[in-house]
Every structure is written in structure tokens, then in C-alpha cells.
Amino acid sequence: MADILTQLQTCLDQLATQFYATLGYLTTYHDNSPALPPPGVPNAVPALAKIAKNETSPPIPASLAAKVASEVPGRASPPPQPPQQPGATGATGLGVGLEGEDPNQPPQPDSPRTFASRQRELARDLIIKEQQIEYLISVLPGIGASEAEQEARIRELEVQLRDVESEREGKVTELRKLKKRLESVLGAVSVGIYGERDYQK
């Protein structure tokens, strides 16, 4: 298992990746109209520019506004249809993609319910990762201790390290003695019980 600092760095990297993925999802699958006018429509105005500055109610998503406009005649004109491309196929008039969609066009926005559900899920994942980071920070050694207490703890650990090092050196010396003893025993076995001369006869 990795130490706490490595785990903390991994969690921070994962959090940055989650932020990037969340922003990518929100940017790609929102149902607002694009800020730039679509090609072929010279006087298109973004939906956000049509909102009154002093309006206190939240803006209506573009997909719902188009639905209301199509149901109530005379209130607003329906949104302009995308221009048909030459050689387009399918019922929508767009080029063929994985599902009959043009691969150059952005994906269709999620429904408001799906979008809200995924927003909650992404937010929950970010909160869980942030709580993991907070926990790892809370269990770091020295958190909640003053500088003097940390210095005293370091001195104690230095004394313990010296004791362990001296014990290790003693074990190394003992191991060398045992090695010499074992070599003498193996030498005696290789010579034989009756001595080297008798063994050669």
C-alpha cells in the first residue's frame, strides 16, 4: 500500500480529471443554444442575449422554448432549421454517422431530466473525492501538533533510529561469526571423517 502522500497526490490527480470530465460533459450535453451563430444563418442571436437583464426567473432551456413556441402560434418564430448538406441521407437530412447523424455536428443534448440526474451524479463524485482528500490530509503525521511537538517527536524518532541501527550492526557481526562457523563445519564435512589422506586412499 502506498504512503499517504502518494495516495493524496493520486486523489488530487483524479479530482483534476473529474473536473475536466465534468466540464466536458456540461459543455457538450447542455441544451442551451450555441453562443456562435450556426453557419448559413447570418442574423442568429444567441438565446442568452434575448433574456432581459432585470429578469429574476431562470432562463428557459432552448429545447423547451422551441417546444412552447411551436405549440403557441404567434408568440415566437420557430428556430431555424439547419441547412441541408449536399449528399445528406436519412430522415433528419444530416450526413450518415453512427446513428444517422453527422459526425461533424455536436451530439444531441440530453433531456432536462437526464442532464439534471447526471449533474447530481457528477457533483456527488466530486464531493466524495474531496472528502477522501480531506481524510488523507487529516491523517497526515503532524496534523494538529505544534512545531515544538513535531520537533520533539523527530528527536525521539532519531534516538529510536540510532538504537535500531546499533542493533542491526550487532546482528551483522553475529551473522559474520555464524558464517565463519558454518564454513568451518562445511570444510570438515568436505574433508571427511577420517581425514584428507585416508579419504584419498
Image: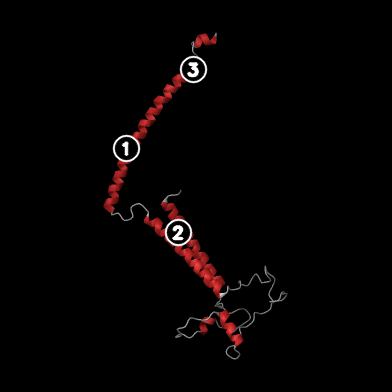
Q: Position of residue 114 (x, y in %)?
A: 56, 71
Residue type beneath disc 3: Val
Relative to 181, say whether 46 is above or below: below
Which residue is identified by label 3?
189
Q: Position of residue 162 (x, y in %)?
A: 32, 38
Residue at 53 percent across and 11 percent down: it is 199
Q: Position of residue 181 (x, y in %)?
A: 42, 22
Residue at 45 percent across and 22 percent down: it is 183
Q: Earlier in the sequence, mark 2 or mark 3?
A: 2
Which residue is identified by label 2?
12
Q: Nearer the viewer, residue 114 or 29?
A: 114
Along the horizontal axis of the image, is 15 left or right of 137?
Answer: right
Tell me the quadrant of the picture where the C terminus can be found: top right
Which residue is identified by label 1?
163
Residue type beneath disc 1: Asp
Farthest residue toward the bottom? 74
Residue type beneath disc 2: Leu
Q: Nearer the viewer, residue 144 or 116?
A: 116
Q: Secondary structure at mark 3?
A: helix
Q: Nearer the viewer, residue 179 or 193?
A: 193
Q: Nearer the viewer, mark 2 or mark 3?
A: 3
Residue at 49 percent across and 69 percent down: it is 120
